């Protein structure tokens, strides 16, 4: 099935779930790489030999926000899966009905 | 996309990927992902039996300050009776499901749940956000999207049974 043939709810699930994960991982990753902490996108405390914190490095974007976007994308997929389970029988899911040319 | 039909154990199997390499690779990924979880589960059983006490501790401490903190802490406080035996048991069952391709999508949903908790809880971002936890999480999602149990997995046969024919929604949990 081609994308434009999908039902609205299927298109929404695909775009929203992958979009949220793409935003959290790639888009905010690009921002963090060039405007924040390129190598370690998390809060890191530097300590001296006595164990005292002498410097704290914080990323531009709170990693909880990026993780939250990934979790939100997965949550969309979960809701979509539950929605499909309560829908009428999936005839199109049967492997025998497919396109025949590459 | 080409369709391939062949007979396996008396059943006519229809596959929809384009070639042998694609089918073999999907099956290969499924088996390796299954082995990863089977190994993680069965070694916990060998060490602690069905009493994985670190499970509730992990939920309450490691995950306490994360975006799933409220859910994780609640689970650690109220579902410890389930988490302790559930972690090794479900990891093993998820692994077996993927290894043999039985209830593959249902097993992979369980894998997604586990890996989401690990990705969020471990917060291992010393080398970037895209770490091994996230990759394994994406592997489980790939198993679901591709219905990986239909490729050299027993779900290809199970889906041909009269019971599944009568209850076609089960294909969302199989395959």
Image: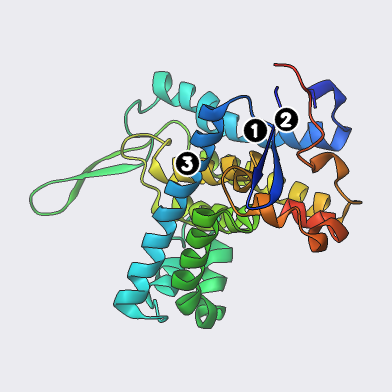
Q: In this orientation, which residue lies closer to the viewer: B116 or B95?
A: B95
Which residue in the protein does label 2 denote? A15
- Cα distance between the residues tagged 3 and 2: 25 Å
Asked if disc 1 and disc 2 are in contact, CB closer than 8 Å, the reply is yes
Which chain hosts label 1? A
Seen in the image, is B41 located left or right of residue B94?
left
Q: Position of residue B170 (x, y in %)?
A: 77, 57
Q: Residues within 10 Å of mark 1 (few under 14, many from 20)?
A: some
State whether residue B174 appears in this view: no
Query: Are the residues under marks 3 and 2 on the same chain?
Result: no
Which chain hosts label 2? A
Query: Are the residues under marks 1 and 2 on the same chain?
Result: yes
Seen in the image, is B73 located left or right of residue B45?
right
Q: Where is residue A86 in the image (x, y as percent from the top left)?
A: 86, 56
Asked if disc 3 and disc 2 are in contact, CB closer than 8 Å, the reply is no
Q: In this orientation, which residue lies closer to the viewer: B51 or B123?
A: B51
- From the image, state whether disc 3 or disc 2 is nearer to you: 3
Q: In this orientation, which residue lies closer to the viewer: B53 or B33?
A: B33
Q: Residue at x 41, y 66 (%)?
A: B41
């Amino acid at each position: 099935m081609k994308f434009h043939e999908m039902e609205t709810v299927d298109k929404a699930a695909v775009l929203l779930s992958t979009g949220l994960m793409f935003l959290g991982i790639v888009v905010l990753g690009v921002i963090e790489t060039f405007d924040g902490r390129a190598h370690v996108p998390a809060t890191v405390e530097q300590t001296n030999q006595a164990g005292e914190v002498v410097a704290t490095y914080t990323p531009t974007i709170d990693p909880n926000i990026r993780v939250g976007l990934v979790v939100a994308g997965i949550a969309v997929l979960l809701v979509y899966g539950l929605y499909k389970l309560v829908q009428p029988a999936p005839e199109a899911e049967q492997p025998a009905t497919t396109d025949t040319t590459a | 996309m080409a369709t391939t039909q062949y007979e396996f154990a008396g059943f006519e199997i229809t596959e929809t990927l384009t070639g042998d390499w694609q089918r073999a690779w999907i099956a290969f990924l499924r088996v390796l992902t299954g082995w990863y979880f089977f190994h993680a589960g069965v070694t916990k059983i060998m060490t602690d039996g069905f009493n994985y006490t670190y499970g509730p501790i992990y939920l309450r401490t490691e995950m306490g300050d994360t975006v799933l903190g409220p859910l994780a802490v609640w689970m650690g406080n109220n579902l410890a009776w389930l988490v302790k035996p559930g972690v090794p048991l479900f990891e093993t069952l998820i692994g077996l499901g993927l290894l043999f391709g039985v209830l593959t999508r249902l097993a992979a949903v369980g894998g997604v749940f586990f890996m989401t908790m690990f990705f969020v809880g471990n917060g291992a971002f010393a080398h970037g956000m895209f770490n091994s936890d996230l990759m394994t999480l994406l592997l489980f999602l790939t198993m679901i999207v591709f219905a990986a149990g239909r490729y050299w997995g027993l779900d290809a046969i199970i889906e041909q049974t009269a019971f599944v024919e009568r209850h076609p929604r089960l294909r969302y949990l199989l395959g």
